[in-house]
Amino acid sequence: MSKIRSAASLRHFSTEHSHIYLSRLCTTEYNRRASFFSSLFVRSGEELGISKMYLQYYINENGDKVYTTKKESPLGVATQSAHPARFSPDDPYSRQRVLLKKRFGLLPTQQPPVKY
């Protein structure tokens, strides 16, 4: 429980000192509450020390593709990326794609090809 003192208990301080004391008290209380509320929200992967997950694959003994997020297969061979060449899990333009889909009803990739 935090100790919150009333203004009457600060009478023995000068005006300047009480202002400093109150500002520190308010800052401490704000930081305590901010840390509590921030703990309620889901943190991003970077804050938790988790790297972005790129889907990888490797070929097992039977010749089948096995998908994983690991960089190395159980055989010790490096895995290959399972994403298209220009794929990014960040997806920086997703907001614009959603806006276009709402506005026009289809995405540019769903349109018929342009005839030249």
Image (cartoon, rainbow, N blue to C red):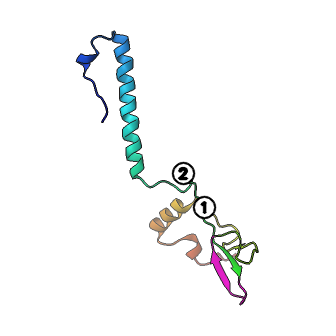
Query: In the image, 24: left or right of 100?
Result: left
Q: Residue furthest right?
A: 77
Q: Which residues are magenta?
A: 60-69
N-terminal of the pair, mark 1 or mark 2, is: 2
The amino acid at mark 1 is Lys
Q: Quadrant of the C terminus?
A: bottom right
Badge 2 density bin: few <14, some 14–19, many ≥20, Cα 10 Å: few
Is 89 above or below relative to 9?
A: below
Q: Position of residue 97 (x, y in %)?
A: 53, 64
Q: Which residue is mark 1?
A: 52
Query: Is residue 67 found inside the magenta-colored segment of the image?
Result: yes
Q: Which image quarter: residue 78?
A: bottom right
Is 5 above or below relative to 18?
A: below
- Secondary structure under the numbered disc 1 in the rendered image: loop
Q: Which image quarter: residue 12?
A: top left
Q: Quadrant of the N terminus?
A: top left
Q: Which residue is mark 2?
A: 47
Q: Residue at x 48, y 68 (%)?
A: 101
The amino acid at mark 2 is Glu
Q: Residue at x 72, y 73 (%)?
A: 79
Q: Which image quarter: residue 23?
A: top left
Calculate the distance from the C-alpha at mark 1 to the C-alpha at mark 2: 12 Å
Q: Residue furthest bottom?
A: 62
Query: In the image, 9: left or right of 56?
Result: left
Q: Residue at x 63, y 74 (%)?
A: 68
